[in-house]
Image: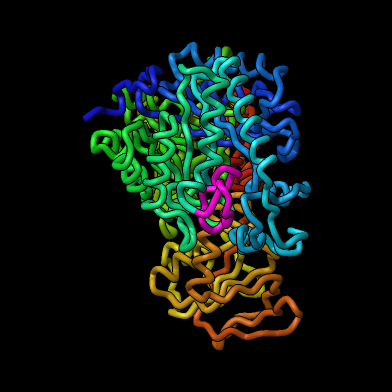
Amino acid sequence: MPKLSDPINIRGMEVKNRLAFPPMLTQSSDTNGCPTEKTLNAYETKARGGTGLITYEAVSPDPRFFGIGGNQANLSKDDNIAAYKKLTDEVHKYGAKIGIQLAGGGLIEFTFAKLFNFDLEPIGPSQTDLLHATSAFETMAPNWATKLGRSETRALNIEEIIKVEDQFAAGAKRAIQAGFDFVEVHSAHGTLHATFLSPYLNKRTDQYGGSLENSCTFLIETVEKMRKSMGEKPPIFVRISADELLPDGLKIKDTQQIAQTIENAGVDCIDVSQGIILRSPYGITIPTYFEHGAFIHIPEAIKKAVNVPVIGVGRIVDPKMADEFIQQGKADIIYMGRQLICDADTPNKYFNGQLDDIKYCLGCLQSCGACVYDAFSGLNYKELTPSTELKKIVVLGAGIAGMEAARVAKLRGHEVEIYEKSDKIGGLIPLLAAEYKKEDFMNIVNYLEIQLKKLEVPIHLNKELTKEEISALKPDILVLGVGSEATIPVKLEGKTNVLTQDEAILKSKPMGKNVVVWGLDTYWKGGVETAITLAEQGYNVKALAGSEQVIAVQIFANFGRRFWILEYLRDNNIPVYMKAKLLDVTEKGVSFLNKDGKEQLIEADSLVFCGSRISNGKKLKKACEGAAPKIQLIGDAKRPRDIGEAMKDAQTFARKLK
């Protein structure tokens, strides 16, 4: 069987290895729909990192700018060809093949436009109940039904269908002129072509519906017109949602037939995904609650039905796993999207045997333009250069901010050492990783620990330095990365049945069986995932309550993660109280004012308070004045925020050193 490192030939296109980067929106195009410097950064780093095949993000072939905020990629006019040629030339320097994904809008574009207050007409193969067709957003977005402003999609007529096909053909021709090696039709996740394949959305009785074969007509006609416009040489890919992950959606047995049909129509490679962003987004933006490679059985089933190469995707972050899937014959190519955003050098590191140098994705879904690991990666890539004025730097705190500041400063040539008052590294990350199915959050700590050992940066544990001891070390710069502490309201201090979020996760304070969790956001600003964690541990979560108007607003745009959370709360009957005001906690339970201003009591043994944290960084900085010529606060010591901000603080400090 082939291996991940082996080349593969697709219609005469030789791809150097089978590790690929999928089409993922960067929303980095200019107002004409052309790549920008940020776009070049994102794709050039993937090519330089050793990726064999890259598929450029969804590009509209429609001359109307459907893009939200005007930054969606567009290739509907000849004037844009030169800008795309600059990008493909850059990628080709590293031996990678790059294709482009053409996407018609349909319901997916209408829905995202609505989220950002743009008004588009909802179109599809048939008249369909719009609220049901976008049910994930009804779950996630307050007042979604009101926001829609209409009740049904409008069915396209045949003239309009043909116009879309012609636009795809013209877009494909421009793509080849721009230097792309292949063109993919996006027929998954709720795009226009996907809606024609979907049995729930396509109720037509003409040649474009009524049977599984007829539902493929729009896609087949599009492919045939593309082939005529592109010429015989370039491969044509099609992306499908082979399982829409819905009771009334496409199932694998259906898409096996669809795959055979489009193969017979001349498709050269089938890119197999799953889910519909509008109704089952957890199959697309896959949260940590799913096992790695959880959907590999889907491309495996399609591969059994066709003879053309098949691409597999779905929370595969370890190239060893990708290699195993290739060798087991489950797919011919493996897409690693968020992993390559996290570490664009993953292919080179894996093929060169540098496995412990790989930065493994956390699955946080927080920032996939520039990963939370590194604010100067991806779209914001900036090369790290040596310093010219070397300093001695002492870092207090072995949380991720302190460790990252030390790592980057050391790479630039500075002398660095870390002092940590506790017996462990990682700061708050082990707490996050202890929540339900979030073990991967420890990836960032493990990576930093390995790199600091390789760089010979000493970490002194169980060592809380005095001002005099700091002075004796004679640092040029003292970095304070001492983190933050959980708090509870003053009126609840001293109550034995009130716990902080940290205490509940660590089980460092007695907690009753019946609990109320306060705070509707995610760690550290709220306890929605802490409530799920406690429920999975066997506690009876009597309620999740808080002053917030929206659940998990901090991850509002992380559709797969947030949708899974909301479904869990619903399916497990955990009562949620929004716009609530906490009054008191007694032996009887927790009292609060509900959104209507009425007092309510929930009988419970304990309250887990998940609210704001406090930092002692400024106080410590004042106490250390004079111990070093310069004192720098970073991460939560500066102001409690999140992983991305902590890492950005650390890197910004270390990169600004002369």
Q: Is residue 568 above or below residue 44?
A: below
What residue sits 71% from the left and 64% below the top? 145
State the image coordinates of residue 250 (x, y, percent, origin top left).
Answer: 46, 54
Q: Where is 527 relative to 300, above or below? A: below
Of all residues, the one furthest to the left in this rendering is 1
- Whether residue 204 appears in magenta in the rendering, the answer is yes
The tally of labels here is: 0
Image x and y of residue 185, in percent: 53, 34
Q: Main secondary structure of the magenta part?
A: loop
The residue lying furthest to the bottom in this view is 588
For the record, the magenta segment spans 190-210
The image quadrant of residue 168 is top right
Residue in view at x 21 percent, y 30 percent: 1
Residue closest to the eye, 492 or 436: 436
Dividing the picture into quadrants, the one containing residue 142 is bottom right
The reply, left or right, for residue 9 in relation to residue 119 is left
Using the rendered image of the protein, determine whether residue 391 is visible from the camera's viewpoint: no
Identify which residue is drawn at 45% across, 56% down: 245
The image position of residue 473, as x and y in percent, is 49, 29
